[in-house]
Amino acid sequence: MRVFTAALATETNTFSPIAIDRRAFEASLYSGPGEHPATPTLCTAPITVGREVCAREGWTLIEGSASWADPAGLIARGTYEELRDEILGQLQAALPVDGVVLGLHGAMVAQGYDDPEGDLLTRVRQIVGPDVLVCAELDPHSHLTAKRVAAANFFVVFKEFPHTDFVDRARDLWGIAVRTLKGEITPVMSVFDCRMIDIFPTSKQPMRGFVDRLYALEKSEPGVLSLSVIHGFMAGDVPEMGTKVIAVTDGDAAAGAALAERLGRELFAMRGTFMVAQVDEKAAVDAAVAAPVGPVVIADVWDNPGGGTAGDATVILAELIARGITDVAVGTIWDPIAVQICMAAGEGAVIPLRFGAKSAPHTGNPIDQTVTVNRIVCDAQMRFGESYAPFGDAAWISFAGIDVILNSTRAQSFDPSLFSALGIDPKTRKILLIKSTNHFYDSFSKIAAEIIYCAAGKPYPNTPKTTPYRKARRDIWPMVENPWG
């Protein structure tokens, strides 16, 4: 067997002012054919897992390019087309192939393209023809369009949020692909539109129990190959935004459709109950100060670079400074200019510095402090499950009992190693201020005495009922109370 694999992925917040070009992909991950590192990024596990599978099966794996950019705003049209056409050219050169296994995200939007993944998959299908297997792994925070469903044989989606399972789901994807190519199964995909948009953390109930049921059903239901929930991505203003359920069965589309609908209606019945409670910056600081022991993690949930924001909001930090709170470590504030200034000054320098709150309104004001530059690290990175997430050149500065990590490549706070990478022991601080909606939970919960979810400022369009969408459908909850009426 000859199988082609490649990856092209990012998550687009269409409301974000941060434009994406090729440099953004190169800053996070760009690997030419055969050059992907041994460890996967969030959306490139089909490549690394494919190496294991094809070596075991004695098959030929043809690797194309792998590109990942940290979430931000719209991708430049020329950048998307260039990266797309690289992969298509590599696929054309690899023909004939028996299968195509891709790593995608599913919430990419480019200038002139509301559905880049649908565009890419359609072009792949046109190259390989109707009889070659085409499948992909997706992030659940994506848009499942009719165009994508028509072009692919099946999708497998991460089940967990935080996305701790992206390698396991890549193994599921390849498991189904191998059985299909051997003629053992015929996967068909059924999709149910839940007519809603919500946020579904699996670190708490009720989504924890729902996902555990998906795992159980995959094992117990005859003919069920895979079950997935497309959560949807509310910051993507595209026509087919929303939550959907995918059932992949062995040749039984009717059974898959019935199961997907049953699960989808169960999700809809629980709408509005999934997200953890959030408090404002004043209540968050009150709770952190009152906690008897640390570390207390304050998660700045909506200034989350993983959702396409800048990650430079200062609302919570300003509250801590105003109250004279000490024993605080902040990871991170995105400010490439401030990092450059710190690098020029050098370690040990004491300098006046303005940083943060430069990207967008409603994110606070820049911070002006005389700071000590404690450490500079070039090309810093942190752990994320079985992978590493780069956060660029970084500087550890301190002032008035507060430590702040400034970074030059936007990245959400996945793991406490973001602090230790700069020389800070996060377990020794009373308060850790981080930027992430929920991906932080798996790792930070292991060291945190308490976790506080804080909604501060307005860096992210987190209220679909009032978000000024121009393209997204308005016939789903919570835009309407009863989309089934």
Image: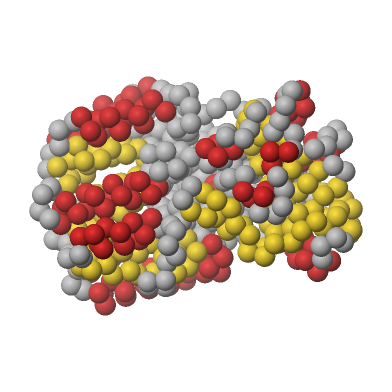
Side of 367 relative to 128 (left or right): right
Mark count: 0
State the residue in front, 282 or 35. 35
Residue 426, percent from left and from top: 69, 42
Task: Look at the image and tell me in which quarter the N terminus lies.
Answer: bottom left
Taking the view exactly as shown, the residue that stands out farthest to the bottom is: 93
Q: Residue at x 51, y 60 (%)?
A: 69
Q: Nearer the viewer, residue 394 or 22?
A: 394
Q: Position of residue 410 (x, y in %)?
A: 61, 55
In the displayed orientation, state which residue is furthest to the left. Answer: 183
What residue lies at 58% left-to-right and 53% top-to-bottom? 382
Rendered residue at 17%/62% (across/down): 132
Relative depth, front residue between 236 and 447: 447
Query: Viewer-proximal residue, 483 or 204?
Result: 204
Against 409, residue 215 (above or below) is above
Residue drawn where x is 40% and y is 43% of the image: 165
Residue 340 in percent (x, y) is at 75, 66
- Where is residue 393, by image quadrant? bottom right
* Residue 55 placement (x, y as % from top left): 26, 63
Above or below, 444 relative to 356: above
Colour scheme of this structure image? Answer: secondary structure
Residue 378 visible in the snapshot = yes
Q: Horizontally, is 234 left or right of 483 in the view?
A: right
User: Is residue 448 left or right of 141 when viewed as pictured?
Assistant: right
Residue 240 visible in this rendered orientation of the protein: no
